Amino acid sequence: DTEVTQTPKHLVMGMTNKKSLKCEQHMGHRAMYWYKQKAKKPPELMFVYSYEKLSINESVPSRFSPECPNSSLLNLHLHALQPEDSALYLCASSHLGTSLNEQFFGPGTRLTVL
Amino acid sequence: GENVEQHPSTLSVQEGDSAVIKCTYSDSASNYFPWYKQELGKGPQLIIDIRSNVGEKKDQRIAVTLNKTAKHFSLHITETQPEDSAVYFCAAAYSSASKIIFGSGTRLSIRP
């Protein structure tokens, strides 16, 4: 299995809703990432987990809350989002080690905040 | 911090011709340079990468060159085909599980 899966594919939520995005990989990768991508822009890093511990938080607002329950799963909990948070949310994973390893991206969740 | 500039922002080439996308980076500590292809409605897909101890790498119709002194790296696609139409991102990073800095992207269109 060489893919990263994300659910749901599309999500529409109101500003008072609570929802979660899910990401899963079975490639044995111990680093997992959340990115946000606005239209016609490159992905922007939000969070990095290494060995299930949060290692990088790119000053993301607290209305985004990541969680890594185990080495295969990554969640992004959403609460009280704003319309400007509408974007494609991408999950990625990679090996950890002494040499750099490529990041594998999932297809993303298209989020619309009303 | 690292900054990656990518040119051109759009590129249209005749099917069968070559396409070249160029990037520059600012941080000399960067030592890993991946290229991603993103098709409409999909996540970015790694198509080729190069590390700083190598000057050139080729995989079938795709090649990447790296000039560490000038902090330039380029993607070359030969014999372009319609399925090469996509947005291409260059990127730079300097350690495992670190922040990958993406260029702004190039929208490549292949004219039949």
Image (cartoon, coloured by chain):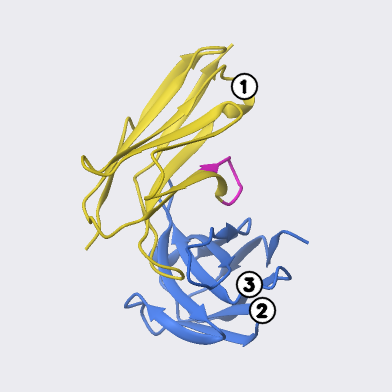
Q: Amino acid at mark 2?
A: Leu
For numbered disc 2, what is the local secondary structure?
strand
Q: In this orientation, does residue A41 appear? A: no
The total of numbered circles placed on residues is 3
The spot of residue B96 in percent (x, y) is 45, 68
**Of helix, strand and loop, which one carries label 1?**
helix
Q: List the residue tagged with mark 3.
A: A29
- Range shown magenta: B37-43
Q: What is the residue that sits farthest to the right in this orientation?
A: A1
- Main SS type for the magenta part? loop
The CA span between labels 1 and 2 is 36 Å
Mark 2 = which residue?
Answer: A73
Q: Give the x, y percent position of residue A91.
A: 57, 66
Q: Quadrant of the C terminus of chain B?
A: top right
Chain A pictured colour: blue
Q: Earlier in the sequence, mark 3 or mark 2?
A: 3
Q: Describe residue B2's horizontal placement relative to residue B62 as left or right.
A: left
Instruction: Give the Cα distance between marks 3 and 2.
Output: 10 Å
Q: Which residue is mark 1?
A: B82
The disc labelled 3 sits on which kind of residue?
His
Circle 2 residues within 10 Å: few <14, some 14–19, many ≥20: some
The structure residue drawn at horizontal position 58% and vertical position 26%, both measured from the top left corner, is B61
Residue depicted at 45% across the width and 27% down the height: B76
- Which subunit holds the residue at mark 3? A
